């Protein structure tokens, strides 16, 4: 293990001991927010320090086993322990390096999921509906909550655009790789001659801000319009100006929300989506200079970039960022995304490890 990594682990071990003392004292419980922060830090450091202690014990056991090789009576046993120790140390060290990688501060946030139909007309809108169902089923599998914020339904039952809020543990950590262009190849329901068509949708996954203060919005730079909601909802929703449209003048971002009967709630929801969009745009601009490091997240940062193809005639799904093809399209469209998302997470982790090695 490199000395720099060992030094960092020793520092974390000392910090964990300090946290143990602070949490055990009565002082820490007087400030609830402070106590919560200390508890979160303790929970984050505990597995790292525990694994480091395992590494130290394994290193010590290996050193003892090497010394035992000189004893003829213990040599056979020592050889077995040396082999086991030499196999375990690199594995433990690799796990430690992963635990020491910089954390994405957004990983535990809830998200706003936006799906928009692109090229392909009605077929694209139908595919947008398929994608939304896919993510909704995935959310159900992970026991996340999903709430539709705004939806523009197409004539054939798909979505021209749909925005949903997904809340739960580690939502952004799992879905942040989904932003980009999604392409479908299949025979549309409206195709009478059996020809395969290619359509596309764009997906954007944006972390929800903790509070509106996370992004400073000048009230003079937004325009708020109210109007009567359209579509289903009964007499009340269609007779009051409950729908809200917010336009952020400097960026041209427009957010509409008409899902609730309450104008106040629609306005609050629309502001939350607006903040998330502005925040997402600011982060993408900041990261534009290091796009290669983020290629597994959203490619070059262009929402229209094709990241994945769903080929129904061949029963395959291909993620072009990592050249992964899975022949289980029915399962994937039903929300079985763990293998895809896991592969993307591992590739991103490998990239971070490579960058960490280069910086040392």
Image (cartoon, grey):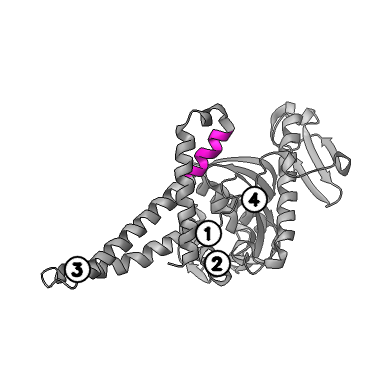
Report which residue position mark 1 lands on: 101
Residue at 37% in and 54% down? 53
Which badge, 1 or 2, is on the more N-terminal residue? 1
Please state which of the two labelled residues, at mark 4 or mark 3, is closer to the viewer. Answer: 3
The stretch in magenta equals 34-43
Q: Secondary structure at mark 1?
A: loop
Q: Give the residue number, with chain letter if any, for mark 2.
A: 356
Camera sees residue 156: no
Quadrant in which residue 301 is drawn: bottom right
| Gap between marks 3 and 2 measured at Cα | 37 Å
Q: Are marks 1 and 2 in contact (CB under 8 Å)?
A: yes
Alpha-carbon span between mark 1 and mark 3: 37 Å
- Quadrant, the N terminus: bottom left
Say whether residue 31 is left or right of residue 85: right
- Of mark 1 and mark 4, the one earlier in the sequence is 1
Q: Secondary structure at mark 2?
A: helix
Whether pointer 1 and pointer 4 mark residues with C-beta atoms closer than 8 Å, the reply is no
Distance between the alpha carbons at the discs numbered 1 and 2? 8 Å
Which residue is identified by label 3? 68
Task: Please tell me whether mark 4 or mark 2 is closer to you in this view.
Answer: 2
Disc 3 crowd rating (10 Å Cα; few below 14, some 14-19, many 20+) is some
Which residue is at the front of the view, 240 or 12?
12
């Amino acid at each position: 293990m490199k000395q720099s990594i060992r030094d960092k682990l020793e520092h974390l071990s000392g910090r964990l001991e300090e946290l143990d003392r602070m949490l055990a004292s009565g002082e820490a419980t007087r400030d609830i927010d402070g106590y919560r922060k200390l508890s979160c830090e303790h929970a984050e450091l505990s597995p790292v320090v525990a694994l480091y202690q395992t590494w130290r014990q394994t290193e010590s056991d290996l050193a003892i086993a090497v010394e035992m090789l000189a004893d003829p009576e213990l040599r056979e046993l020592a050889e077995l322990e040396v082999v086991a120790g030499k196999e375990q140390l690199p594995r433990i060290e690799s796990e430690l390096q992963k635990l020491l990688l910089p954390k994405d501060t957004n990983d535990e946030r809830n998200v706003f999921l936006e799906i928009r139909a692109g090229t392909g007309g009605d077929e694209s809108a139908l595919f947008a509906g398929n994608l939304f169902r896919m993510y909704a089923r995935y959310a159900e599998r992970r026991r996340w909550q999903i709430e539709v914020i705004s939806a523009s339904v197409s004539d054939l039952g798909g979505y021209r655009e749909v925005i949903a809020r997904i809340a739960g543990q580690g939502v952004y950590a799992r879905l942040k790789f989904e932003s980009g262009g999604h392409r479908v190849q299949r025979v549309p329901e409206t195709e009478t001659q059996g020809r395969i068509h290619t359509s596309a949708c764009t997906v954007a996954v944006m972390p929800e801000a903790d509070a509106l203060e996370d992004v400073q919005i000048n009230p003079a730079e937004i325009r708020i319009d109210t109007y009567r909601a359209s579509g289903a909802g009964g007499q009340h929703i269609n007779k009051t100006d409950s729908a809200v449209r917010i336009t952020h003048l400097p960026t041209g971002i427009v957010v509409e929300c008409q899902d609730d009967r309450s104008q106040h709630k629609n306005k609050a929801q629309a502001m939350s989506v607006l903040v998330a969009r502005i925040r997402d745009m600011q982060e993408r601009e900041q990261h534009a200079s290091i796009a290669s490091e983020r290629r597994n997240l959203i490619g070059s940062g262009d929402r229209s970039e094709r990241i994945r193809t769903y080929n129904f005639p061949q029963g395959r799904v291909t993620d072009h960022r990592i050249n992964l093809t899975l022949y289980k399209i029915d399962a994937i469209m039903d929300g079985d995304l763990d293998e895809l998302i896991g592969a993307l997470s591992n590739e991103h982790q490998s990239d971070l490890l490579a960058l960490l090695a280069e910086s040392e």
